[in-house]
Structure formats: C-alpha cells, structure tokens
Amino acid sequence: MWTPEAGLFAIQQASAAGFDLLEILLPPSMEFDAPIVKRQLKQHGLKATCSLNLPKEAHIPFYPKKATCLIKEALDKASELEVDYLGGVLHSGIGVFSGKQRTREEENMLCEVWAEVAEYAGRSGITIGIEPIYRYESYMCTSAEEVLRFIKCVNAPNLSLHLDTFHMNIEETSFYEPVIAAGSRLRHIHMTESDRGMLGEGNVRWDDLFRGLQEIDFNGNLVLENFSNSVPGMAEAVSLWRPSKYNADALAKGSLAFMRKMAREYQ
C-alpha cells in the first residue's frame, strides 16, 4: 500500500540513489493523494510513471465492469499526477485462474475493456501498457505475442506493450525477438534478473535485450524491479524464500549502475 510516509521514503531513496524516474504502483483502493505526491516528486527532482495490477475482484473475464471502472480510476490518478503512462497487469487478476485455457469469449471481453479504457485514457493523453506475466500467475496474457495480437485487434494508438525480463526469461524463447516484434509499441520494461536479484548476475540475456532496443530506437522507460527480503514483508509478498544476497540499497545502486553501463554500450 502507498502511504504518505512510505511513499515519501521511496521518493527520497530513489532520488538519492540516482534514479530519474519512479514507477508508482497504485493501490486498488485508490487511496493516493496525487497532489501531495506530485509536489514531493518535484522537490526531489524525479519524474514518475504509474502502474496498476488488477486484483482478483477485477479479473476481466469474471468482472469486466469492475475492471473497467478500476482502470479508469487509475487513469484519473495518473492524470492528476500529470504522467502520461499507466502500465501493469491490466488483463487479469494476478493468481486468478478459470481452470481451463483462455476462451474466445474471454478474449473478446478483454478487447472490449481495453478499447473502452484506451479511449478514456486518450482524453488525457495517457498511454496504457499491458504487461504479460508468467503462467503461474495468469492464463490470459503470458507472452508478448499474445498482447501484441490483442492490441492489434483493438487498434487503439495509445495501447502498448509492457515487458518484464523476469517473466520473459520463463515465457519467451528470446529477449531480442519480442522487442523487434513490438517496435514502437514497446514503451516500458521492468528490468529484473532471473532470480529477482542483482542485474547481470543471473540468466537474463541482457546483450540480446539491449541489441533489440538499439535496433528499434527505443525511447521508453527502463524501470528497475528487483526485490530484497531485507525489506520487512517482501519475502511474503513476492515469494523470496531464500535470504537475499544483497540488501535493498545495494541491490538498487548496483543494478542501476549495470543498466547505465548497458545503455552506454548500446547507444
């Protein structure tokens, strides 16, 4: 949950570590004071982007109206914050399954919801990014190809792909080809190692990813997303059952340095 105290701490720490942008995961309750956060970001020299992960009670195939309303509420918060991007798991509730493969009816419902929220987002100049996640958390969108296919069906100019290298490492056969396939539809990437740890110390093929980004002239957001169980409650939240090698501060600074090195090499 984003609280005034924890939010300010996140902003201060991100700025002190040398980041220039902070992704704010909006709470489904939408208890989020955008004017205050906007002021805090400005005070610490940070830009922002927003994300939302649909909760189980807004799983699109089961509750399309609830999902539509929640995404619109998130877009309103993003507009208040004056950011131009809302990404995240906007296809299904994380961990919600029907027990079967995705159906054509569910696909149609998904596209209908995306079409409505994309039109709503366009009024505020906001781009929506859809993040595919691995098979153990969703059955709706698990690969870049699926998201791109549904985006093509909706045909809204402000729908985009949001990749996550942790999920790519499991679901994709390449870190290069999904980037090339997406082209200008790729706007946002969660930079995450295969074990959620220090970038460059796992199995993600970073050279392939950055080679693809270079070829499509990527100018979107590269957002670090790694976790340390030095943070109370993090182990339970993201299933970190082994002790982390690094504390959160070292993980953030070391991974940021790695991202900058790779970006320089593939300018």
Image (cartoon, helix red, strand yellow):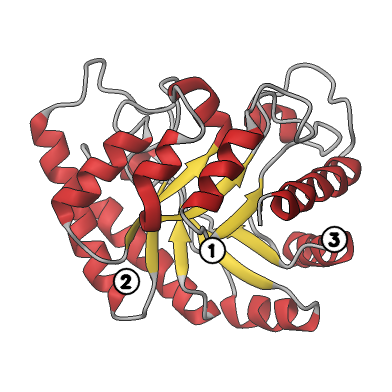
182 is higher (above) or lower (below) than 121: above
Q: Position of residue 239 (x, y in %)?
A: 65, 23
Q: Considering the numbered disc 2 on the image, is that residue within a helix, a strand or a loop?
A: helix
- Mark 1 or mark 3, which is nearer the start of the sequence? 3
- Front position in the image: 260 or 256: 260
The label on residue 219 is 1
* Quadrant assignment, res 159: bottom left
User: What's under tag 2, amino acid-wise?
Assistant: Ala
Query: How far apart are the two marked residues, 3 and 1, measured between alpha carbons?
Result: 25 Å
Q: Are marks 2 and 1 in contact (CB under 8 Å)?
A: no
- Nearest-to-viewer mark from 2 and 1: 1
Q: Which residue is mark 2?
A: 121
Count of marks, rendered view = 3
Q: Is residue 5 left or right of residue 174?
A: right
Query: How far apart are the two marked residues, 3 and 2, measured between alpha carbons?
Result: 30 Å
Q: Considering the numbered disc 3 on the image, is that residue within a helix, a strand or a loop?
A: helix
- Nearest-to-viewer mark from 3 and 1: 1
178 is higher (above) or lower (below) than 202: below
> Which quadrant is the C terminus positioned in?
bottom right
Query: How far apart are the two marked residues, 2 and 1, measured between alpha carbons?
Result: 21 Å
User: What's under tag 3, amino acid-wise?
Assistant: Gln
Q: Residues within 10 Å of mark 1 (few under 14, many from 20)?
A: few
Q: Position of residue 66 (x, y in %)?
A: 27, 53
- Front position in the image: 160 or 184: 184
Residue at image x 77%, y 62%?
A: 19
Q: Position of residue 178 (x, y in %)?
A: 41, 37
Residue at image x 49%, y 35%?
A: 176
Q: Which residue is mark 3?
A: 13
Q: Considering the numbered disc 1 on the image, is that residue within a helix, a strand or a loop?
A: loop
20 is higher (above) or lower (below) than 201: below
